[in-house]
């Protein structure tokens, strides 16, 4: 294995450890909430899924900055890098405030659609939205600078605070869904603090103005990709809350929470892969070797977890969510659906790092197909789960075939 391969594996190993810790804390948070909120658990999950979709612009900023920061660093344009980061913070803070206000105004509509009586959780998630849209500026910049130790620390601190304080508010103070969301807000603030510290040396320098033409050109494909992927992996919980009773929706939410551990595990691979792909693309070096390493690692991690969900769903649900026994049937399907989405995430990142936008069209097409299937077929929770399975499998199959054809041409 070459030196670049060893460097890739070291970075992945470190971030994988941090991601596992973060995933464990996030998962324990979900377990505590699911077993104490009972039927109100679906309400919490629908709010958090909505929150994930609403933070799409912030996720876009993270990927855009990662690529541009990496390029500026590779070209030795340090002063322009500082100017880019400072101006981005100013812009995104204003956007976060506007987004939070828009969400507050929309509270009556959201309460009606999601069948939520208490507006306080949505008010708190509005605060978290304002905080969370700022966070990716530091995260994306640290990723572009390949400061993986800072990313690892930042990845784990938010879920840790969320678990500790969220559990205190729900179990100790009996604040219900409001307490659970309060833990999310405080965890987001802790994560923001670390992300700013990760790039404080660049923020301390005024720097030179950076022309934003290159950034703007990259925003459109990133925004499109992140919107599609966020809807693909979150719309199911929202529609389950809309179509089914609280009890049935809570069972589905429990299964989705367990299955999304599979989606979360390869996060470290993407965090390392993206800046390395971008750097190799800028320098006209081979990118497929990096991609193949990422596919192998992700497939092994995800498929092992998916097999466990298929073979032992009742046992897993009984241990983790004893009050949500109906989740087992759905978990079998969602286990492999999330494996496909884990691999889809790699193809999405490859497309954005190398300007291979054909993958984005595939992503968009199957996003529309998934939502359409859920709207037409939702007589039972398994219908929604199968819609995710079909979309994820389709994305991976077509993307993989295209990749192999391109390699054969080369």
Image (cartoon, grey):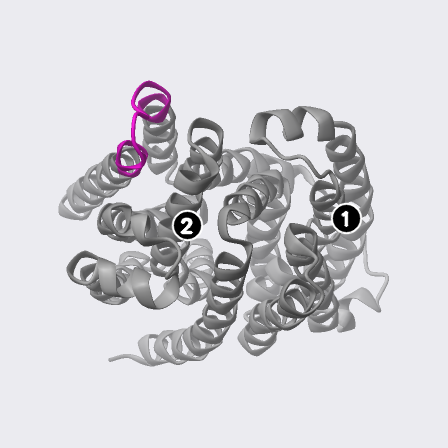
- Pick whichever of labels 1 and 2 is earlier in the sequence: 1
Looking at the image, can residue 260 be seen? yes
Could you tell me which residue is drawn at 37 percent across and 40 percent down?
356
- Indicate whether 165 appears above or below 235: below
- Span highlighted in magenta in the image: 372-385
Report helix, strand or loop for mark 1: helix
Report helix, strand or loop for mark 2: helix
Calculate the distance from the C-alpha at mark 1 to the C-alpha at mark 2.
Answer: 29 Å
**Res. 127 mark:** 1
Depth check, front residue: 320 or 271: 320
Residue 71, image x, y percentages:
57, 57
Total count of labels:
2
Crowding near the residue tagged with mark 1, few <14, some 14–19, many ≥20 C-alpha atoms within 10 Å: many
- Indicate whether 345 appears above or below 143: above
Quadrant where the N terminus is found in the figure: bottom left
Q: Is residue 210 left or right of residue 359?
A: right
Q: Is residue 205 left or right of residue 289?
A: right
Residue 172, image x, y percentages:
68, 70
Looking at the image, can residue 284 be seen? no
Depth check, front residue: 238 or 39: 39
Q: Is residue 37 left or right of residue 280?
A: right
Residue 202, image x, y percentages:
76, 67
Could you tell me which residue is drawn at 31 percent across and 60 percent down?
317
Q: Main secondary structure of the magenta part?
A: helix
Depth check, front residue: 278 or 410: 278
Crowding near the residue tagged with mark 2, few <14, some 14–19, many ≥20 C-alpha atoms within 10 Å: many
Residue 150, image x, y percentages:
61, 75
Depth check, front residue: 56 or 114: 114
The residue singled out by tag 2 in the image is 349
**Res. 139 mark:** none
Q: Residue reaching furthest top?
A: 376
Q: Quadrant of residue 20?
A: bottom left
């Amino acid at each position: 294995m070459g030196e670049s391969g060893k460097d890739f594996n070291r970075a992945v190993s470190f971030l994988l450890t941090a991601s596992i810790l973060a995933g464990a804390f996030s998962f324990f948070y979900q377990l505590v909430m699911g077993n104490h909120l009972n039927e109100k658990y679906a309400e919490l999950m629908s709010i958090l899924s909505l929150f994930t979709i609403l933070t799409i612009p912030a996720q876009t900023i993270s990927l855009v900055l990662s690529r541009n920061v990496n390029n500026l660093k590779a070209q030795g344009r340090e002063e322009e890098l500082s100017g880019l980061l400072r101006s981005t913070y100013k812009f995104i803070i204003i956007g976060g405030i506007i987004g939070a206000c828009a969400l507050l105004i929309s509270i009556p509509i959201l309460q009606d659609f999601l069948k939520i009586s208490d507006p306080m959780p949505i008010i708190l998630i509005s605060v978290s939205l304002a905080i969370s849209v700022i966070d990716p500026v530091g995260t994306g910049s640290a990723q572009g600078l390949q400061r993986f130790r800072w990313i690892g620390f930042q990845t784990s601190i938010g879920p840790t605070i969320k678990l500790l304080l969220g559990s205190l508010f729900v179990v100790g103070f009996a604040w219900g869904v409001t307490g659970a969301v309060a833990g999310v807000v405080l965890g987001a603030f802790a994560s923001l603090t670390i992300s700013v510290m990760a790039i404080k040396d660049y923020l301390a320098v005024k720097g030179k103005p950076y022309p934003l033409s290159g950034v703007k050109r990259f925003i459109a494909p990133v925004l499109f990709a992140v919107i599609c992927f966020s809807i693909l992996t979150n719309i199911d919980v929202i529609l389950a809350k809309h179509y089914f009773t609280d009890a049935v929706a809570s069972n589905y939410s429990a299964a989705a929470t367990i299955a999304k551990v599979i989606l979360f595990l390869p996060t470290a691979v993407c965090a390392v892969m993206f800046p390395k792909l971008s750097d190799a693309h800028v320098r006209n070096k081979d990118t497929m070797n990096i991609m193949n390493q990422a596919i192998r690692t992700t497939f092994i991690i995800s498929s092992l977890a998916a097999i466990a969900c298929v073979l032992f769903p009742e046992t897993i649900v009984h241990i983790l969510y004893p009050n949500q026994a109906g989740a087992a049937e759905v978990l079998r399907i969602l286990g492999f659906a999330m494996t496909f989405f884990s691999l889809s995430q790699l193809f999405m990142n490859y497309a954005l790092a190398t300007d291979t936008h054909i993958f984005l069209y595939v992503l968009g097409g199957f996003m529309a197909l998934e939502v359409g299937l859920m709207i037409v077929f939702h007589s039972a929770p398994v219908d929604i789960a199968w819609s995710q399975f079909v979309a994820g499998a389709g994305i991976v199959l077509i993307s993989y075939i295209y990749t192999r054809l391109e390699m054969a041409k080369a």
